[in-house]
Amino acid sequence: MCADKINPIRPTDDEARALARSLLEGARFAALAVTDATTGTPMVTRIALGTDARGTPLSLVSTLSQHTTALAKDPNCALLVGEPGDKGDPLTHPRLSIQARAEIVARDDPRHAPLADRYLADHPKARLYADFGDFRYVLFTPTRALLNGGFGKAFELTPDDLAK
Amino acid sequence: MCADKINPIRPTDDEARALARSLLEGARFAALAVTDATTGTPMVTRIALGTDARGTPLSLVSTLSQHTTALAKDPNCALLVGEPGDKGDPLTHPRLSIQARAEIVARDDPRHAPLADRYLADHPKARLYADFGDFRYVLFTPTRALLNGGFGKAFELTPDDLAK
């Protein structure tokens, strides 16, 4: 067998779209990749994750954190969702890599309150810090995504493929 | 309580160094952030992870994958290790964000065989594909790291803090 001859990207079908949406809707947290504002090179951190009413990825972040500073300078970013279990080869577990643009929502933006209601219903422990002055909701609008359902099962997805 | 007045970075101590090393040595996989060779923006994917004899993060990747194409163009990258459990606030679980430079090791490099021996002892299921012609070992030499041990417990680490 010669893997060099395999095209790793399959045509996107409804099963792939459904898997991608279930990975996103089921995620309680994500890895967030940004361009570090100091070094100009990649940085990856963990954030808690929810979605807004339209299924757009949503988080609550501190403006004191390096990733928020990075997003304020360059909103291009990426999210990884889909967690392996404790057993077996972690690369056989499906995961979704989303490239996105981040929008930090001001506290006086009319979207702040409805986003807070939705996010805190999903993440009740975040009520402990959600009202601290340095916290903001961030919306991540997908630009493209790569679904990896295991070896040889990769799909390139559009924002429409991910939308509800 | 006003979080704006808290400096979120604590002085690095031996406890922080030990936690960082245990997160890295204990990781079976990581989130890898790269700069996408096509878009020039962040991308984040999952890779399996081991370490070499000196504790340097190590993976086995396909040259067919987008992250390997990205690393070949720009070796600046980042890794996230330390997985939350299924319960509680995922942001209270410790995790380590490592910024690094990747080196793709050629198959005829004298380091290939010893890296393969070590990696495949830790990841025996990777023997299924390790000998495919498109797979390469990659070493990630840390340049800096951020350890987040939970709210208010962040530490900036140097490569020496992470070394064995």
Image (cartoon, coloured by chain):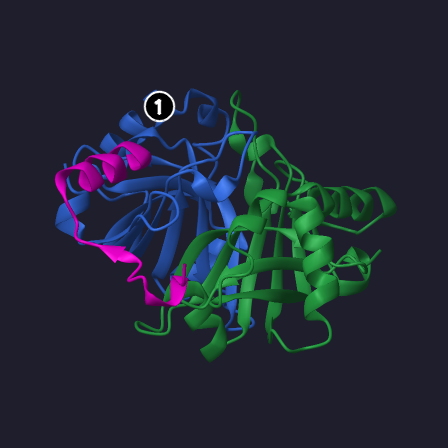
Chain colours: A green, B blue
Q: Quadrant of the N terminus of chain A?
A: top right
Residue B49 visible, this angle:
yes
The correct choice, above or below, for A95 with respect to B155 in the image is above
Residue beneath disc 1: B122
Task: Give the extent of the magenta segment.
Answer: B1-24
The correct choice, above or below, for B53 with respect to A40 in the image is above
| Residue at image point 26% right, 57% down | B9
| Residue at image point 34% right, 43% down | B149
| Residue at image point 73% right, 76% down | A110
Indicate the amino acid at tag 1: Asp
Is the residue marked by circle 1 packed among few (<14), some (14-19), or many (20+) residues within 10 Å?
some
The correct choice, above or below, for B122 with respect to B37 in the image is above
Q: Nearer the viewer, residue A42 or B88?
A: B88
Q: Nearer the viewer, residue A72 or B134?
A: A72
Residue B160, how many percent across, how many down? Answer: 12, 48
Q: Which quarter of the picture shows residue A160?
A: bottom right
Q: Which quarter of the picture shows residue A35?
A: bottom left
